[in-house]
Structures are given as structure tokens and as C-alpha cells.
Amino acid sequence: MLTLKSQMEIQKNVDVTDLSTLRIKAVADHFAQPKNIEELIELLKFAKDNGIKVMFLGGGSNSLLSSKKIDSLLISTLKIDFIKEDINNVFDLGVGLKMPRFCGKMIHKSLTGAEFMVGIPGSIGGGLVMNAGAHGREFADIFVSAKVLDLETLEIHEFNHNDMNFSYRSSVIDPERYCVLSVKVKLEFAEKEEIRSRVASYNKSRTTSQPLKAWTCGCTFKNPQSDYPAGKLIQDIGGKELSIGEMQVSDVHANFFENTGSASSSDFIELVSLVQGLAIEKKNIQLLPEVQPIGFFTEDERKIWLN
Ligand SMILES: Cc1cc2nc3c(=O)[nH]c(=O)nc-3n(C[C@H](O)[C@H](O)[C@H](O)COP(=O)(O)OP(=O)(O)OC[C@H]3O[C@@H](n4cnc5c(N)ncnc54)[C@H](O)[C@@H]3O)c2cc1C
């Protein structure tokens, strides 16, 4: 173990299996959990000075951790979970704050805009990077600005909407280049009952259509076309019957892959690759994973992310 000036610890060989919603067995060579932005910046400077590669994990709900190795400093942002209220319903948010928690707090204030976050088990940082969305709304809709640290130069920049290049489940933030430090969002006043009923209907639609108790990372693939969701496509090509090792396509929602016990990242990749092959063979459609790789994957394994 290594201790930095602020007394923050960098631990070695840490089992990080429980930090991802897929629960794939994984160990990080180095691991740290800063409690605030100052500690996070100290950590990033230390890593740069010592030539150590860094990787970030928020809620771990869209990440595939490598079972082979995570040969870097894995930083969990979950403790950086502040909410600071600005003027005019603008909020400055810690990147580790869970999106459903933020949504819950906003309901109490009769503020609308964050309802889409209610069933997305990720952090503000992960939500921004992925431009997370649901029910026709996405992160970009409420985004004002973000403080990001450039990992090459260690300079801090303020990105506004134009800088973010938002598109479907994508933003300009490449975690190999930038660390998001904090995010500002803006909401609007609305009737509390109206917000509550919207949230209730979103919750209901998830509980009936998604395997919420299983170990998954939500949708495995991005929708190839807005009018042909990946789940429907996988069902159409007979994907609901597929499994590799202890990783299987969910019979509740075919775009969710479930770890039924001790699946490895290789099982997950093989299943993704099998489904991608079938989608090409039967429909001539290229499926691209929404889930992001964390750690070491062979060149062959990385092919599932190439388009
Ligand atoms: C049951 C379930 C339902 C889901 N439903 C939805 C849905 O409806 N809509 C949707 O869009 N997604 C959904 N998801 C997927 C996931 O929750 C979202 O993509 C979410 O935004 C990921 O946030 P996270 O904090 O978990 O990200 P993580 O998995 O922790 O990280 C995702 C990526 O962001 C990077 N990252 C995280 N924090 C930072 C930071 N501070 N700086 C730089 N990079 C960072 C990571 O390195 C990684 O590359 C679902 C997942 C599950 C398990």
C-alpha cells in the first residue's frame, strides 16, 4: 500500500468484482477511492509523475472489467458525491453521485428533468461520458458544463454544451484522455405530482421489461437503428437461447446479458462475438457494444468494439 500526502491510500491487488454490476471476477493492480476533487487531482498528478496509467469507474454499470488483469490504477469516483445548489436551478454535482439518488432529491424540490435517470444505476460521471438516456430524454438535455482534467497536460478545462459533441450514448469524453471532475446541470420547476407519476411509470416499465435482479450491465449493444432496437433484433435471430459458460442472453430482455455465477470477461466477449456474427449473417446488421472495456483485453477480444 502507498499513502499520498493527503493520507489517501493506493492499495495493491484489490478485488474489484463487486464494483461492477456484471460482477465479473476482476483484480486491479492498483486501486484508490478519493473522497473529494482535491484528492482526485492529487492522485492524477501522482499517476502522471510516476508514469502510471489510470482508469475510472463510477457505478460500474456500463463497464466490462477484464478477468485477466487491470494493469493500471483503477479510480473509483463513488465517494465524490456532493450536490451543490447554484442559482436558477443549476446544480454542481460530484461525479460519483448516483443518478437515481439525484433524481430522488430533485423530486422533493419539485424540479423536473432528471426523471429519466431513475432506473439508470450509474454515476453522474459515467452518465455524462455515455450520454445516458431513457424514455426519450438524455444527459445532454440537462447538461450545462463540466470541469474536466486533461490527463496529458494536467490542465483543467470547463467544457460547455458545444464542446461535448453529444450523440446517441456518446460524448467527446474519452476516459483515456480526460477525467471528469464535476458536472453542472439545469432543471425546471414543475408540479411534484406530475414528476412523481412520471417516475412511477418509468419504474413500472423497467420492472416488467428488464431483468433487474440479475447481474448485467444493462443493454449490451447500442440500438443499431432507432426503429429496430438491439433487443428485438437479437430475439429475431434466435439469440435468446444463447449462452457461453455462465454468461447468458436474458430471456426477459435479449439485449441484457446475465452473469449467472462466475462468468469471466472472456465468456462475455465470446457471447457478444457470437451474437454479432449472427446479426451480420441473418440481418446484415453490425451490432456495436455499449459496454466499455476496463483493463487488459487481447487484440482479438478488442475486435468486438471495432466498427
Ligand atoms: C439495470 C441497468 C439498466 C440500465 N439502463 C440504462 C438506460 O436506460 N439508459 C442508459 O443510457 N444506460 C443504462 N444502463 C447502463 C449504465 O447504467 C449507464 O451507461 C450509466 O451512465 C453508466 O454510468 P456508470 O457510472 O455506471 O459508468 P461506469 O460503468 O462506471 O463507466 C462508464 C465509462 O465512463 C468512464 N467514466 C466514469 N466516470 C468517469 C469520470 N469521472 N471521468 C472519465 N471517465 C469516466 C469509465 O471509465 C467507463 O469508460 C443500465 C445499466 C443497468 C445495469
Image (cartoon, rainbow, N blue to C red):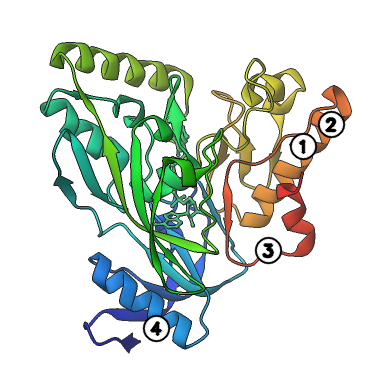
- Labels 2 and 3: the sequence-earlier one: 2
Helix, strand, or loop for circle 1?
A: helix
Per the rendering, the mark at residue 276 is: 1
Mark 2 nearby-residue class (10 Å; few <14, some 14–19, many ≥20):
few
Crowd rating for badge 4 (residues with CA inside 10 Å; few <14, some 14–19, many 20+)? few
Write the residue at 69% across / 27% down.
Answer: 224
Q: Residue at x 63, y 36 (%)?
A: 221
In this rendering, the answer to whether 69 lies above or below 288 is: below
Residue 259: image location, x then y, percent: 55, 44
From the top left corner, tell me how far across and down residue 7 is, in percent.
22, 83
Q: Which mark, by number, is residue 297? A: 3
- Residue marked by disc 4: 46
Q: Quadrant of the C terminus?
A: top right
Of the numbered discs 3 and 4, the one sitting upstream in the chain is 4
Determine whether 283 is above or below 66 in the image. above
Is the shortest distance between ligand 1 and the CB of mark 4 under 8 Å?
no
Residue 33, given in percent of the width and then of the height, sits at 31, 68
